[in-house]
Image (cartoon, rainbow, N blue to C red):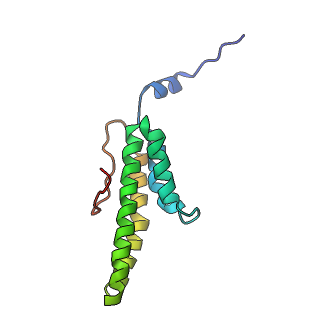
Amino acid sequence: MTKLSIPEEQQTRLSNNEPNATLASLAHWSFLITFVVPFANLIIPLVLYNTTGKEDLFVKANAKEALNFLLFVIIMGIVFALLVFVIIGIPLLLLLGLFTLVMPIIAAIQTMSASKGDAVYKYPIIFRLIS
């Protein structure tokens, strides 16, 4: 039988214990994926949190942050929808939509460039219900 060998650059990468930045950023990209796949912004972070998050704390923290962002957007969307009757809700809903489109892109890019020891990206302004 022949022996299979792993190239040296892959051996060091596997043993380096770096955070899985690609999977962690998927939790943030799910907000854009939801335009194609309904409820992806809820399903993907929950699956990452409950599967890979058990082994990789970086993925778990990013999935938790994405879920907090989703809760923030839902709650503020309801509040701003009620404020539509006072006219101020229309521009607030537009700003919330822009915030929901731009911030996950920034979060995903920051997460993809993370290396070992980097802090998890925190969305500004949001409240965190999942701690």
Q: Does residue 30 show up?
A: no
Spot occupied by residue 98 in the image (x, y as percentages of width and height): 40, 72
Left or right of 3: which side holds 95? left
Q: Please give the name of the residue rendered at 53% of the width and 58% of the height, measured from the top-left corner.
A: 40
Q: Please give the name of the residue rendered at 41% of the width and 73% of the height, measured from the top-left corner.
A: 97
Answer above or below: position of 113 versus 83.
above
Camera-side residue: 15 or 90?
90
Answer above or below: position of 75 versus 53.
below
Residue projecting furthest to the right? 1
Q: Please give the name of the residue rendered at 41% of the width and 67% of the height, measured from the top-left corner.
A: 100
Spot occupied by residue 52 in the image (x, y as percentages of width and height): 47, 39
Camera-side residue: 19 or 13?
19
Camera-side residue: 38 or 31?
38
Spot occupied by residue 102 in the image (x, y as percentages of width and height): 41, 65
Q: Does residue 90 show up?
A: yes
Instruction: Please state, as top left, top right, bottom left or bottom right, where the N terminus lies in the image.
Output: top right
Answer above or below: position of 65 versus 100.
above
Spot occupied by residue 104 in the image (x, y as percentages of width and height): 41, 59
Q: Please give the name of the residue rendered at 29% of the width and 50% of the height, measured from the top-left corner.
A: 131
Camera-side residue: 21 or 68?
68
